[in-house]
């Protein structure tokens, strides 16, 4: 929800001034929450424009409103994996008709696939085709595609560990992978341009925000060994073996 709000920010404030498609597979979109984040986004732009006399900035600010911001966020809901596949198959036609779309979010990609398939090989093939369709849209329309994948606990003779629901095969389909922890840390696990690293964030009434910089150094020092160790324990892919997807 933070991403779909941010993509609506006008060019004069450093934004894309685009639209977004939010594909909701698990009924997680709370409109009241989206409204509060949109309101905070507008307030953020107002702070940037404080005392600004540039006519373009003033004009852009005067046109910003919650209704206008939300009008560029297209929410598509699906309750089965069949509906999700249908939406993805029609996505190119939608993007062709809505040229301002700069971002597509699928939240989450794994929700229906966790229980709908007993044949894992079939699930892998379906997910591979789905990933190729999303990559094709990203390249053809020059947009960003963000998908969320849930985590699950896998029990083996060596003990229990937390792993991505869709397994490592899905991990190879993504250009960039982030692991978000409830403790407020985002781990960059895979990237075509950046090394593994972490960032500390907090969830506020206004949305997702950075943690104050004066505490970042202490926090990063405290989690450096333990958190990076967790990444290794989870057997996450070595970024040096990544393949870049244009």
Image: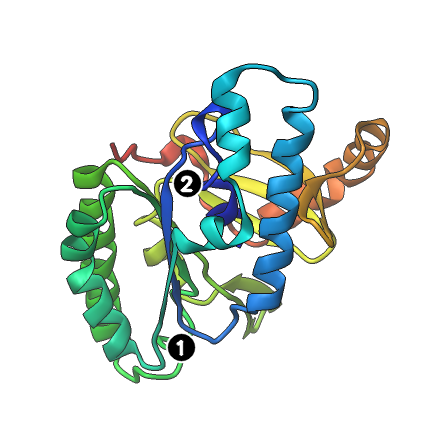
Q: Nearer the viewer, residue 129 or 156?
A: 129
Please say whether residue 5 is visible from this viewpoint: yes
Q: Residue at x 69, y 58 (%)?
A: 182
Give the class, few, some or many, for how many residues have Cα within 10 Å of label 1's Cα (few <14, many ≥20): some
Q: Quadrant of the C terminus?
A: top left
Q: Residue furthest top?
A: 54
Specify how the rendered protein is coloured.
rainbow
Q: Are marks 1 and 2 in contact (CB under 8 Å)?
A: no
* 168 lies above or below 9: below
> At x 70% / y 45%, what residue is drawn?
227
Q: Nearer the viewer, residue 204 or 217?
A: 204
Residue located 79% across and 31% down the image: 216
The location of residue 140, given as percent across then percent down, is 16, 39
SS at badge 2: loop
User: Left of 49 or right of it: where is 55?
Assistant: left
For marks 1 and 2, the one nearer the N-term is 1
Q: Is residue 174 above or below residue 24?
A: above
Instruction: Please name the residue that numbered disc 1 is placed on.
Output: 114
Residue beneath the point at 30% across and 49% down: 173
Q: Residue 110: x and y, percent?
A: 40, 69
The residue under label 2 is: 176
**Category of crowding for the residue at label 2, using alpha-carbon neighbours closer than 10 angstroms: few (below 14), some (14–19), many (at least 20):** some
15 horizontally vs 143: left or right: right
Label for residue 24? none
Question: Which x, y percent locates residue 222?
Answer: 83, 38
């Amino acid at each position: 929800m933070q991403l779909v709000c941010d993509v609506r920010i006008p060019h004069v404030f450093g934004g894309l001034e685009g639209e977004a498609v939010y594909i909701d597979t698990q009924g997680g979109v709370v409109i009241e929450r989206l409204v509060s984040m949109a309101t905070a986004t507008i307030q953020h732009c107002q702070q940037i424009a404080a005392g600004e006399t540039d006519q373009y900035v003033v004009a852009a600010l005067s046109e910003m409103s919650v209704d206008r911001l939300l009008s560029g966020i297209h929410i598509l809901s699906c309750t089965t994996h069949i509906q999700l596949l249908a939406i993805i198959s029609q996505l190119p036609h939608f993007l062709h008709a809505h040229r301002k779309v700069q971002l597509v979010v699928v939240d989450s990609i794994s929700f229906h696939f966790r229980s709908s398939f007993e044949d894992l090989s079939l699930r892998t093939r379906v997910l591979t085709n789905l990933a190729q369709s999303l990559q094709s849209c990203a390249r053809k329309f020059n947009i960003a595609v963000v998908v969320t994948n849930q985590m699950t606990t896998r029990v083996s003779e060596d003990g229990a560990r937390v792993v991505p629901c869709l397994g490592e095969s899905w991990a190879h389909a993504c250009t960039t992978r982030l692991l978000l922890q409830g403790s407020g840390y985002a781990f960059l696990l895979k990237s075509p341009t950046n090394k593994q690293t972490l960032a500390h964030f907090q969830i506020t009434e206004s949305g997702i925000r950075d943690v104050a910089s004066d505490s970042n150094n202490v926090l990063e020092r405290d989690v450096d060994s333990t958190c990076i160790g967790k990444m290794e324990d989870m057997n996450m892919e070595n970024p040096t073996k990544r393949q870049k997807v244009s």
